[in-house]
Structures are given as structure tokens and as C-alpha cells.
Amino acid sequence: MRIPNRSSILNPSGFFRISVFLAALLSIPSLSFSGDGIEWERFRISPALSVSQSYSDNIYLSQSDETDDFITTITPELTLDFAIAQKNYLSLSYRGNFLSYADVNNFKKNHHLGSLSFNSKTAKGSHFIAGLSAQDTAIAPFSKDERSKDYMDQRAFSDILLMIGSLTEIGGGYVYNKVEFDKLEFSDDDFTRNTVDLHVLYKRSLVWPLLLQYRYIGQDNNDLGTINTDFQTHTVFTGARWRPAMKLSGALRLGYTWAIFDETGEPDGQDFSSYAIDSSLVYELSDITRFIFTAERAVQQPTRSARESGDYFIFTSTGLTISHKTWPKITTELDFLYRFKNYKAIQGSTTIRKDRFYRAGVSADYDLRNWITFSLGYRYQHNSSDILSEDYSENFITFTVSLSM
């Protein structure tokens, strides 16, 4: 890890912002919040605010000419719930990220996410959710001479779950996703995507609640060349899903996927098929220790402006998080992630490569009161690629003060 050539490890302007924020909060002894927000008749308002000071020794994720900087981030959040009836409510939410860099000035400074959703539940556990969201965000630049690639990510989503008796549930979900970049030079990364999920869960066995699931993804890319990169995937999963109240919870999904890279769907030698994984499991070892394991394998589309190549890539990842409550108010976490991207070309027209990404981190949260939390974290990440220019390493340190009610 490189040592920054500054007189202090903390950027003075960022440290000042956090100090003022803390002083304002702690100077109000009568201030008291709860985790349920502010309720008034059918309305509930849940505000949150965090301020963080971070340091990166390679903000451009560059293989050479590494640049370090301090980043101050202010993140306000606000959720407004309106109860139409018991177990039926509307939710309107907003989250912003406002960033200030000490030295560089070519990153997007303001990010916004807004969503509106309708939630309906029954006493037997069935539910229906539908909503819309829009996010104004960006892909960060990879050098001092680049600018951020700003884009709008819009989504419409729905999810339905029906309880058929006490042992069987059937469900389905749909997501429409549209990404549009602000600048024409990045428009070859524009796309629209439709995702459909259908599942059946049979819960007669507590040891192995049988899960069967089908997933369809259809993506329409804004192809500027002569090769059509639109694709469809069909995936069938089997496995199990355990209730959150159990010692082991989450879903284990193992299956097989077919990817088709032409509009007609006719077999032409360009298709791909292989095994698929989509699993996320939580194991509660005790009241103070838990393990979170994730695994994924799927076919995905590259994003040129994010330095990805090929016409598609096979994405494989595994992750492990260990959470331990060291003292009544302190929780520590260890986080490990491995990600492998095998980039492929449909007709040998683009660069193919293999990327291996590793990340390890540690963090500690201190709950000063029931509404204010201090967090200190460190992570190291490294990308190793067949293409030398895509290799990079980064050390990242962050200190955060969070307020929520």
C-alpha cells in the first residue's frame, strides 16, 4: 500500500465535515429516534443520513500511473410509506450520493435514485409487489484524461407470491430494465432487458424445502456494428430455499442455462450452454456469529465503457462474509470475494480475455445509540487479466457516521 504524500492520513476538509456533523448531533442530548421512523396516522417517514471520509490509493483502477485521493460522501435517504389498508401500502423513496474529491475533478459528483412501489400482503403470506425506479449514475473514469460515463438506469418491476395451502407456494417476478447513456459516444452500451422468474417451492421437508425455478432474460442491445449482439438466456434451476427464521436460510439454486445470440433463435453454432448457479445462504452459527455464502455462474453482456470486451462473458463468482458481534455494541465483518470473467467472441471480431478478480476486506461497526453508528473499514482488491493494461490493485479505507430513524 502506497503512503500518500500528505501531512495527514485524513483530508482536512472531509474531516472537518464529519466533525461538524458529529458535533451537531451529539450536542442535542434530548434527541431520540427509533428504528420505526416517524408515524402520523397512515403515514410513516423514515429518514437516514450518512457522511463518510474515504481514501483510495488508485482511484482510476489503473495498471500504471496510480493516483490517490480522498473522497467525502454525503448520502441522504428518505422513505415515505402510506398505508392504504392493513398490509397494503405505497412507498416513495429517494437516495442521493454527493461526492467531493480533494484533488481530481472528472468524477460524477451527484448520484440520485428514486423509486415508487406498491406492496400488498395477506395473512396467509401471499404478496404482490409492483413498482418503478430511476437512477442517475455513472461509470467512473479510468484516467485523468477521461470523463465519467453518465447514464440513466430505469426499471419497472413486479413480484407475486401465492400460498397454495400450508406446504406449497408458487411465485413469479418480472423486471424491465432500460439503460441510456447521456453521451452519444457511449451509446453502444445502451440496452433494454426483460427478465422473468417463475418458481414453485414445496415445503414438506424442513431439511430440503424443494425449489424449482425457471428464468428468462432477453436483452436488446444498441448495436452500432454489423454483428447482432442481442441475446436470450433460458435457465432451469433446482435446489432448496429455507426460511429466514431457521439456522440455515436463503436459497441454493443449481441448474442449466442456454444462451442464444441471434434474433431468430435458430441453432447456428453461436449459442452457448452450460451449468448455472445462483445461491445465497446464511448460516447462524450462534446469536453473535453468522456466515454468508454466495455463488453465481451466468452468461452476461459486456459493457464497453467499463473496459469489458468480447460479445459476451461467462461470469463466475464466490463470496464469503463472516459477521461476529465482538461486544454488545461492536460488530466486525470479514469479507472475501473471487470473481472470474471469461470473455468470448461470437465471430472472432472483438478482443477476448480472462479476468480474475480478488477482494478481501474487514470492517467494524459501533452502535453508539440506537440511531447513530460509526463504521471503519478497509478493503484490498486486485484484478489479474490476460491483457496487462487491465491489471490493477487498490487499497481503500473508509470511515462513516450514519444516522437513521
Image: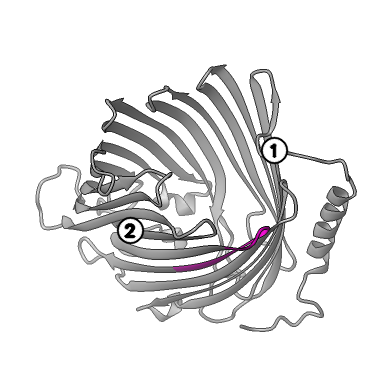
Report x, y in % for residue 133. 51, 35
Magenta span of residues: 325-336
Report x, y in % for residue 373. 70, 54
Residue 47, which numbered label? 1
Q: Residue at x 55, y 63 (%)?
A: 324
Q: Measured along the vertical axis of the image, is residue 300 above or below residue 198?
A: below
Q: Secondary structure at mark 1?
A: strand
Main SS of the magenta part reads strand
Graded by Cα atoms within 10 Å as few (under 14), some (14 to 19) or many (20 or more), the crowding at tag 2 reads some
Q: Quadrant of residue 168?
A: top left
Q: Is residue 72 visible?
A: no
Q: Residue at x 45, y 37 (%)?
A: 155
Q: Is residue 41 visible?
A: yes
Graded by Cα atoms within 10 Å as few (under 14), some (14 to 19) or many (20 or more), the crowding at tag 1 reads some
Residue 48 highlighted magenta (yes or no): no
Identify residue type, mark 2: Glu
Mark 2 lies on residue? 296
Q: Secondary structure at mark 2?
A: strand
Q: Residue at x 71, y 38 (%)?
A: 34
Residue 381, which numbered label? none
Residue 328 highlighted magenta (yes or no): yes
Q: In which quadrant of the rendered image does the N terminus lie? A: bottom right
Identify residue type, mark 1: Pro
Q: Is residue 95 left or right of residue 214?
A: right
Q: Residue at x 43, y 33 (%)?
A: 156
Which is nearer the eye, 121 or 329?
A: 329
Q: Is residue 124 left or right of residue 106?
A: left
Furthest residue toward front: 286
Q: Is residue 363 left or right of residue 168?
A: right
Could you tell me how far apart the alpha carbons at marks 1 and 2 are, in whole angstroms? 33 Å
